[in-house]
Image (cartoon, coloured by chain):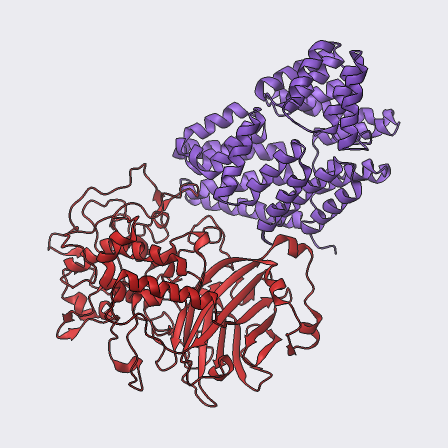
Chain colours: A red, B purple
Amino acid sequence: MADHNDPNAVNSIFSDIDHSPADLYDLFGFPSQDTAGGEKVVIALTFASVPDAGVLDSDLLYRILIAAHPRVVWPPKDEFTLEALGRYFDAVKDKYLGALKTAEIRVTIDPAQKATVKFIDFPGGSFSTVVDIGKVLAIQTPDGYSIQTFIGGRDDAFFNDLPGFFRSINYAPQFYHVPHTMTEARELPIPKTLLELEGNDLFNYDPSNPLLGRGVKKDLPPGPWTWKGDRFKKDANGNYRFVYSGEDAQAGKNVNAIILEIPLAFITRSPAANRVVNTWGESWVRKAAHKVESIPDHPVWLEHPLALLESVRLDEELKKYKLVDTDGQPFADAALSEREDNRQLGANNFWLGPHFVKRLAHLGWGFGPSISALGLQTSFDHGNSPVSVHRTYSSVLEAFPKVRKTLFQGLRMPDDSWNPRGLDIPLRRPFEIFIPNVCAIDMDTTGTWPFGRRLEDQVATRFLALFLDMEAEFNGKKYHIDLLNDQPLWDHAPIMPKTPPNPLKNDVEFLDHFPYLAEPHP
Amino acid sequence: MTPPTDYQVELERTGTDIADLKDRLKACPTDPEKVTRLAYRLYHRASLTANFPDFEAAEAAIDDGIRQFGPKEDLCLLKATLDFRFHRLALVKRDLDMVPALRGRPEGRSMLADLDFQEGRYEQARTAYEDLIRENRTWDNLARLAYYKFKMGDAEDADRLYVEAEDELTAKEMRSYAWVELQRGVLRLTRGCYEDAMAHYRRADVAYTGHWHTDEHIAEALAAQGRFDEAIALYESVIDRAPRPEVRQTLGELYVFIGRPDHAQPWFDQALAGYLESAGRGDVHYYHHLTDFYADVREDGAEALKWARMDLELRDNFATQAALAWALYRDGQLDAARDAMDQALSSGVCDAELFSQAAAIERAAGRASESARHLQKAEEINPHYRNFHVHR
């Protein structure tokens, strides 16, 4: 569940709200190793397994949107200014509101658990087909391509210490009974941090209640929920206490998923030029009024499983649904939209650009000093603060200087394996990763995050690496996005427990063939 | 075998949830989240059945939660909701005051706006609804404003708002959707548009099958259309499923309306017994029905007046003012009746029933032209206002 801050209406992290099939978890996207017959891209959208793993809700509509374009570098590498950032946001806006042609795969399930899959506005046209769920199938397109498809239940491919993340941001509902009405009692106004804060009794690990936040909750004491301390907590041996445990909170959990392996030439007529495949997912729930109408599927779907759609007004279908959730980048909500329903914008999140700068600065004041305390270099300018600080910004101008480097630095990869052909591909930078909120799969790479997202990527830890200074060195090697996954780093750090923040691998092995995600747990 | 209705499925699921929560609480009786959820589930079941013992169970669970954990927002909000449902408006304020922050929450503000409406501060209520909608366009606040518009005579705007409310509802909220459809039906029924009303009621029945609440509305529409036997059968079925005194009174009134008063009497007796039992327990939510019952069924002005005054003390609004006027009329106090009805109508309320009662009062007071004016207004609102209808 990388996308942990979903709209309250469906957010399953609240224990007294039922899980919702509209709750999107993750979007994975990477180039397929199987290049027989041409390049292919793998896209997997995962969501809550409601009503059950392998049983999908017939009131839901899922969309996977896809747009391929050439790789561009913007703004110029050396122009690290607010003006340049503004021009970038404008360019994104113009692109998504203007000429960008977005194709779409739309999935609905009928009560008999047959999936109608519509391919809309692809270069070869639009068509649809009806498929069984729970089966690997090859859908033949009218223009002669074959698309591997799986719709159904799988193991949750996300592996993560979610309670650790919640502890780091002082997210009260994970640890306390918080009434729904108390919207101010979620991220409490305590500095975000990677290291426990001296006297932060609300969130520090309590040996007498070790499961707090991991299934056990306490009563939220009356406020104010602030922190008055001035240092990180240390034990008798001078070690800090890590807010993370490295344990996989998602182990043994299932998801439902839509998984596709699509020929690149089906997505774009110019696969040689359009090397970046942008994709994002959306969940929509049928409006009540249209459930009453019990809309019969257009006969064309049922009578001609593979029929051209050109004469069908598909927008009319979408009007019968409400957009609930979007998913592009892991942790985009943490970085951008927090928990607000009206910020579920998917790719069209360019207007959140200024908020992104302020939010990243807010996170930086939490994570930056923690990183410094561990003897590491941070990309965030916290002015040598000895401890994490709770600071929010109302002005982008004020926030920007603090977060300039974090926004613009190229995220160095641990080695060259991400770029197997050694092409001149610039490192990706945080501002372009999160805005637009899409999974941008670079077909000339392995698709490892942030050049896409592979199943085995430990994205939660890579997200924290945004706050590392990529120009600094550790053991004679430049920092990189997997540095915090490096066990020797923790072995030598003054911290307990000595573990990377999140698990290094999934609880079960991924498959080496389609549909790649492991079988669901019984 | 007939598949279970949506109502049956939901009721069964709620019962299962309740049993499951009770089991879990045996293991850990001091888990505030489970205690709160149990209170909500119990209230939900009571809302489905409208069965008084179910409400008592919900109230006991709420009180138990507050006793164990103090005045938590979720519990106090639920307590306020329950008190509001039973017209205990003073208690609603006390419930909200238990957690001062609640008054600033959207849910608390909606309830305060409802209180404004119930206590006759109509403009404040309207402004509050509009502010809430501006901040967050939720279906329930749209429906609240729609009801305000409906009562104030702007049927077109009311229906537009109900449609907007429906547009906010998803397939996961079909009971709420059906409820809004019923409100749209009432809107049409009170304008004398029976076919339209029935269409909305039927749609509600398709959206959420098997709910006695929908059938109660359909029965009224059938009676209004003169389909009395069908209406009687359906009312009896509703009474079997949700034996509430007000439905018994309605059935009795229908028998009187069709000239079979002998059939009415047992229903009236049962209705009165139910009202008085409730009042005897100290509950206040049937005061309005008791006023209506004594004024129209028994034509006992003094007794009607007693209950009307008690109701007015709790809720001073056009409905209680008009009920007082009608009770005064029955008691032969025509000047006081005219004053009370003038006060009710000065709210701007636009209701054919009220105008017809105002006409009767004026006629009895010898003011023929005033009476005719009110009658004309009643006919403008609902050309068929003399047909069978439920006093809402």
- The residue lying toward the viewer, choosing from B372 and A297, is B372
Depicted B365 relative to depicted B135: above or below: above
Left or right: residue B68 compared with residue B375? left
Q: Residue furthest left?
A: A237
| Snapshot quadrant of residue B280 | top right
Residue B78, x across and y down, in percent: 50, 35
Depicted B71 relative to depicted A273: above or below: above
Left or right: residue B360 compared with residue A325? right
Total count of labels: 0
Residue A252, x across and y down, in percent: 41, 65
- The residue lying toward the viewer, choosing from A271 and A473, is A271
Q: Residue furthest bottom?
A: A37
- The residue lying toward the viewer, choosing from A70 and A334, is A70
| Snapshot quadrant of residue B89 | top right
Depicted B198 relative to depicted A428: above or below: above
| Residue A467 makes an appearance in the image | no
Q: Which quadrant: the N terminus of chain A? A: bottom left
| Residue A205 makes an appearance in the image | yes
Residue A270, x across and y down, in percent: 46, 84
- The residue lying toward the viewer, choosing from B160 and B315, is B160
The residue that appears at 11% across and 52% down in the rendered structure is A236
Q: Residue furthest right?
A: B259
The residue that appears at 45% across and 43% down in the rendered structure is B34
Residue B164, x across and y down, in percent: 60, 47
